[in-house]
Amino acid sequence: MIQKKIKKTEKGRISEINSQIVFITGLSGSGKTVALRSLEDLDFFCVDNLPVSLVTALVSKISDNIRSRNIAVGIDIREKEFLSDIDSVIKTLGKAYTITIIFLEAETDVLIRRFKETRRPHPLGGTLRDAIRSERRSLASLRKKADRIIETSSFTPHQLRKYISSIAFPKRDSQELTVSLISFGFKYGAPDHIDLLFDVRFLPNPNFIPTLKHLTGIDKAVSHYVLKHRESKSFMSKIKDLLDFLLPQYVKEGRAYLSIAVGCTGGNHRSPAIIEAVAKHISKKNREVRIVHRDISS
């Protein structure tokens, strides 16, 4: 697998803030999972319900391997150890990171309705109203330490995602969208969690050309062969038009991250060539592009 990143380079772009750790906590059913996923879309390394004894070790491991990576940790009532040791955790991590605690809550009747709609039991068990009341008491001290308290009763999931994004990156360019482009081979299975997927197995296959068989789609000879055909030119024209229309719509909807996959049979020739051509087009639109050639021969 080959990975690379194309940075957005327009003049005057606001640089990212220093690395931060965001703790997402609050009442069960208040939207903690939605909040955590919104940070994941903003390229945070996210982990849910991690024992407090492992938090500092995890942060250290991530820092060693991924420079300046932002981290989000989901904490709920089940992690009682964290509730008692949060001061020491913040003191330790605060030496190197900006620490933010976000506490989510909602009206009792709203929480009850959400639990009934999802048919999930409350972590504390018993009747919902009693469990929610008990959880409020248990989390009262943590609520006082929170940097942000968000009342989510009137939020839709989309509105909450957008609000969390504005907290995480208050100066973030509202038009910024990171596009992840993945080439793959269908013989190895399609990648998970893809927003848009295109099948280019209809294009002429360089694998049957002896001089190209042992090259890959990122080699100029293969790229030229794949893109020179009439059907390839037609496909590229249509996909460019489609993306020129879709990307602004995703930005308008509040998306910060979009994943697009292109697959061929083995993931070695056609899909990498198409992905490289698509990346070149998108990067001209001043968007950040990340390329992953999942199944390319290394």
Image (cartoon, rainbow, N blue to C red):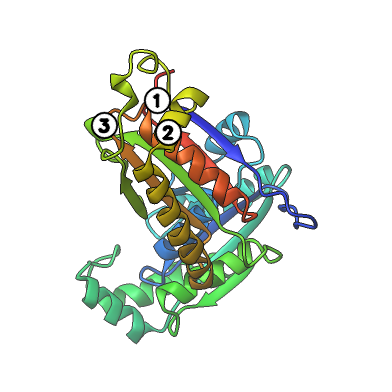
- Check disc 2 and report its element: helix, strand or loop: helix
Q: For the residues labelled 2 and 1, say whether their Cβ atoms are less than 8 Å apart.
A: yes
Q: Position of residue 274 (x, y in %)?
A: 43, 39
Residue 286 vertical position relative to residue 181 in the rendered view, above or below: below
Give the residue displayed 52% in from the left and 36% down from the top.
58
Q: Where is residue 70 in the image (x, y as percent from the top left)?
A: 60, 47
Residue 242's disc number: none
Measured in 3D between alpha carbons, the distance from the residue under mark 3 to the one under mark 1, in whole angstroms, is 11 Å
Pointer 3 or 1: first along the chain: 3
Q: Which amino acid does label 3 sit on?
A: Thr
- 60, 174: nearer the viewer: 174
Is residue 193 something one can see in this rendering? no
Residue that mark 2 sits on: 272
Disc 1: CA contacts within 10 A as few (<14), some (14-19) or many (>=20): many
- 193, 184: nearer the viewer: 184
Residue that mark 3 sits on: 265
Q: For the residues labelled 3 and 2, say whether their Cβ atoms are less than 8 Å apart.
A: no
Q: Quadrant of the N terminus?
A: top left
Give the residue displayed 48% in from the left and 76% down from the top.
159
Left or right: where does residue 4 sit relative to residue 28? right
Give the residue displayed 49% in from the left and 53% down from the top.
40
2 or 1: mark nearer the eye: 2
Disc 2: CA contacts within 10 A as few (<14), some (14-19) or many (>=20): many
Residue 158 vertical position relative to residue 11 in the rendered view, above or below: below
**Residue 22 quadrant:** bottom right
Left or right: where does residue 160 sit relative to residue 109? right
Residue that mark 1 sits on: 296
- Check disc 1 and report its element: helix, strand or loop: loop
Pointer 3 or 2: first along the chain: 3
Measured in 3D between alpha carbons, the distance from the residue under mark 2 to the one under mark 1, in whole angstroms, is 8 Å
